[in-house]
Amino acid sequence: MENLFWWGAVFVLIILYTLQSLFTKLYTEKYPGKPENAASVLTVASGITVVIITFFCFSLCSFTFNPYSILIGALNAVALYGYNYFIVKASSSGPYSILMMFNLSGGIIIPIIAALIMGWDSSWDTTFQIILNTVSILAIISAVYMVSVKKEASADGKSTESGKKSGISASFILSCLGLAVCNGVYGIFLTLQNQTEAAGGEANRDEMVITTFFFAALISFVLGLIREKGAFLGAFRQNKISAMYLIATSLVFALAINLIVIIIPHFDTTILYTIDNSSVLIMSVLISWIFFKEKLSRLNVIGISIMVLALVCMNLLPAIVL
C-alpha cells in the first residue's frame, strides 16, 4: 500500500511538471514586454513564490541555517539559472529536437552516474538490470529526438523540421551541452540534499529549496538590472492574461519542487528521473496535440510508443524476472 502511495505521488508530480511546462509556454506567448525578459521575470516571480510557499506551508516557518544545506542550495541556484540561460540560447539557434535530446539525456544520465558513484542507486545491482537500464535509457533518448521533431510545410511543399536552422553551429552544440550539464547537476543537488547527513537529509530539504530559489530569483533580478538597467523594473508589468499564467506557473512549480524532494528518498535515481523527464515530455506533446491542434507525425507517434515501451520494461521486467 505504501509503495502504491509513492507511485501515486510520482503521477501527481508528472502532472504538476506537465502543467508547469504548459503554463510556461502560454505565459511566454502572452508576456507583454520584450520576449528576452520573459524568462528572467518568470524566474524571479516563481522563485519568490517557491520561497514563500515552502517557508510557510512546508517548513512551517522554520529555517535551521545549516551551512552545508545552504551551500547546496546556492550552487543549485547557479545550475537553475544556467538551465534557463542555455535553454533560451539553444532554442534560438538550433533544432528543438536536438535540444530536447541533450536536455533529457543530461537530466537522466548525469544524476544516475553520480548516484552510482555515491552508492545511492540499487537498480543496477545485477547484470540483467545493467543491460535493461542501459538499453531502456538509450531507447528513450533516441525516442526523445523522434518525439521532439516538429514538421511544417516549406515553400516548396516539402516537410521540414520546424525551427531548423541552415546548420548546426558550434555555439548551438555548446549551448545544448551546457543545458544537459545544468539539468543533470540540478538533479544531483536535489538528491545530494536528501542523501547527505551533513546537509541534514530530509530534515533540511525545505531549507535547500528555499535557498535555491531565493538565490535563483536574486541572480535573475540582478542580471536583469545589469542588462536592462532601470528599464528592467518595467518588465514586471503584466496584463490580465499573462499575470494569470505567471501566477499559475509559479504556484504549480512551488508544489512540484516540494513534492519531488519528498519523493526522492523513496526511489532509485534511475527510475525516478527517467520516468519524470520522459513522462513530462510525452504528456506535453499529447497536450499540444489535443488542445493546441499540433499535428503528430508518424515519427512522433513511433517515438512516443518506444518511450512508453521502454518505461514499462524498465519498471516491470525486473519485478518479473528477478
Image (spheres, rainbow, N blue to C red):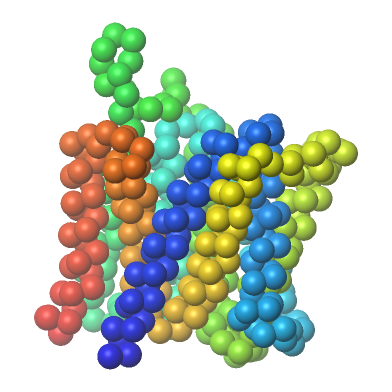
Q: Position of residue 124 (x, y in %)?
A: 30, 77
Q: Residue furthest left?
A: 321
| Residue 59, image quadrant | bottom right
Q: Residue at x 63, y 42 (%)?
A: 240
- Residue 133 location (% of width, % of height): 26, 68
Q: Is residue 26 left or right of residue 127?
A: right
Q: Nearer the viewer, residue 137 or 262?
A: 262
Q: Is residue 117 visible?
A: no
Establish if 314 lies above or below 171: below
- Determine the residue positioned at 63% across, 47% down: 243
Query: x and y percent of residue 198 in the render?
Result: 65, 88
Q: In the rendered image, which quarter contains the C terminus? A: bottom left
Q: In the figure, is residue 236 to the left or right of 280?
A: right
Q: Residue at 52% across / 62% down in the picture?
A: 252
Q: Quadrant of the N terminus?
A: bottom left
Outermost residue toward the right? 230
- Of residue 99 and residue 308, the one placed in the foreground of this image is 308
**Residue at x-position 21% and y-position 38%:** 299
For the image shown, how many numbered marks are present on the structure?
A: 0
Locate residue 193: give its quadrant: bottom right
Picture coordinates of residue 169, whole percent (x, y): 50, 29
- Relative placement, left or right, of 230 versus 113 is right
Using the image as rendered, state which of residue 35 and residue 135 is in the foreground: 35
Residue 159 seen anywhere in this rendered image of the structure: yes
Image quarter of residue 318: bottom left
> Foreground residue, 290 or 316?
290
